[in-house]
Image: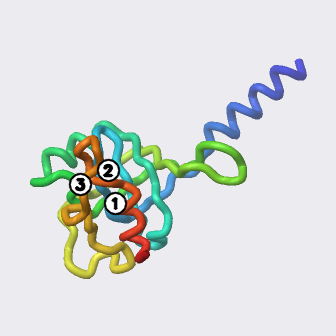
Amino acid sequence: MRRFELLVIATLLLGCHPTTDVHGIYVGDDGEGTLFPCDDPTIIVRVPDSTLAATYRLMVTEPHQPVFVHLRGVSGHAGSIYGGPRYFLVHQVVEIRARQTGECPKVRRPVSPVLPSSSTGQPNKRLKLAARRGY
C-alpha cells in the first residue's frame, strides 16, 4: 500500500510541471536548436524539437541565421543539482519570424559568418560564444 501511495504522488508531481512562455532568439543546428532568451541572454538553452527545427530550416536562407521565437513549454536542467545544460521542451510554437531591428536588444547579432570554421567545416562554437560574451 505504501509503494502505491508513493507512486501516485510521484506521478502527480512529475505531471504538474508548469508551462512557461519564452521569447528569444533561436538559431537552428542539425535538428536541435539553441535559444537565447530576451530577458536573460547570458543563458544558453538547448531546444530539442524536430518540428521547430524543420520550420526553421524552411524559413532561413543561410545556416545559423537567427530568428525571433515565442515558445510555450517546459524548461529544465540536465545534469547535477550544481548545474548542467538547460533545455526547453516545446509544447507549442506560438510565433517564429525574422528578427526585427531592436528586438531582444540584449542578445547581440551573431558573428558566425566572420569567424573561422572548425576542422569539421562548421562554425567554431567556442569562438562564437566568446564573441557573444564580448571577450
Identified by mark 3, the residue type is His
In the rendered image, is residue 67 in sight? no
For the residues marked 3 and 1, what is the alpha-carbon distance in whole angstroms?
A: 18 Å
User: Are discs 1 and 2 less than 8 Å apart at CB?
Assistant: yes
**Residue 23 found in image quarter:** bottom left
Helix, strand or loop for disc 2: strand
Is residue 57 found left or right of 34 in the rendered image? Answer: left
Between circles 3 and 1, the one closer to the viewer is 3
**Residue 38 found in image quarter:** bottom left
Residue drawn at 35 percent across, 42 percent down = 32
Judge by depth and name the residue closer to the eye, 73 or 119.
119
What residue does disc 1 label? 70
> Badge 3: how crowded within 10 Å, few (<14), some, or many (20+)?
many
Residue drawn at 89 percent across, 22 percent down = 2
Q: Closer to the N terminus: mark 1 or mark 2?
A: 1
Q: Which residue lies furthest to the right in this view?
A: 2
What residue does disc 2 label? 93
For the residues marked 1 and 2, what is the alpha-carbon distance in whole angstroms?
A: 6 Å
> Badge 1: how crowded within 10 Å, few (<14), some, or many (20+)?
some
In the rendered image, is residue 100 in sight? yes
Q: Closer to the N terminus: mark 3 or mark 1?
A: 3
Helix, strand or loop for disc 3: loop
What residue does disc 3 label? 64
Identified by mark 1, the residue type is His
